[in-house]
Amino acid sequence: MSQKAQKKPELPPTQAIEQDFDLRAKTQNWFEYPIVVHPHHTDYAGVVWHGTYLTWMEAARIEYLRSIGIDYAELVNLGYELPVVELALRYHKPLSLGMEAIVKTMMAEIVGVRIHWDYRIESRDTQELYLSGRVTLVSLDRAAGKIMRQLPPSVKEAMVKISR
């Protein structure tokens, strides 16, 4: 088989994604997901490894979606996916072994097919901020390997529900 035939389709750069200005939603409702730092989350010094924060953020987002009626596994079975296309994080203060915290996430806004999620990882008493960030997702048609021009109807309905 030639190299050309083996090559997987590439996604266009995010600025090439067509925007649907009919759907603009914003929300101010934080979803809270509690975490505890276990040994497998840390480096040899007992400090949380930087990639662990991404795992916690994704878990919080998936649980938030589940709480409003979107089962991510079901979405994938229907042929859709919501991959991350942009990520921005700011590490404010490290978490260490045994500490407890809250991952807060909310859908900040939808602009066309871009779904922007904001994050804060804070102490339970909200006195300490450990991380803040934003993740941008798009809707992907898995079979075609292409970004969809519109969100799937079930996702669009659920996202509008979040924004109310």
Image (spheres, rainbow, N blue to C red):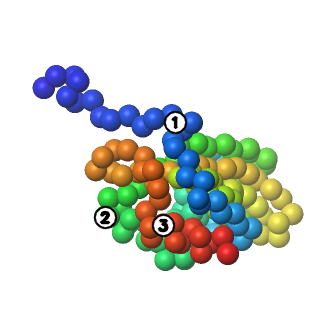
User: What residue is disc 3 on?
Assistant: 155
Distance from disc 2 to disc 3, alpha carbons, whole Å, reads 14 Å
Q: Which label was assigned to residue 77?
A: 2
Q: Badge 2: how crowded within 10 Å, few (<14), some, or many (20+)?
A: few
Percent position of residue 61, x then y = 57, 63
Q: Amino acid at mark 2?
A: Asn
Q: Nearer the viewer, mark 3 or mark 1?
A: 1
User: What residue is disc 1 on?
Assistant: 16
Viewer-closest of 1 and 50: 1
Q: Secondary structure at mark 1?
A: helix
Q: Amino acid at mark 1?
A: Ala
Name the residue at 69% across, 63% down: 26
Q: Amino acid at mark 3?
A: Val
Name the residue at 33% across, 51% down: 142
Percent position of residue 16, x then y = 52, 36
Q: Is residue 41 visible?
A: no
Viewer-closest of 9 and 52: 9
Q: Secondary structure at mark 2?
A: helix
How many marks the image carries: the answer is 3
Name the residue at 54% across, 77% down: 67
Distance from disc 3 to disc 1, alpha carbons, whole Å, reads 22 Å
Which residue in the rendered view is the most extreme toward the front? 22
Q: Badge 3: how crowded within 10 Å, few (<14), some, or many (20+)?
A: some
Viewer-closest of 32 and 164: 164
> Which quarter of the figure has residue 7?
top left
Say above or below: 2 vs 24: above
Q: Is residue 69 visible?
A: yes
Say which quadrant the C terminus sits in: bottom right
Say whether residue 154 is left or right of residue 99.
Answer: left
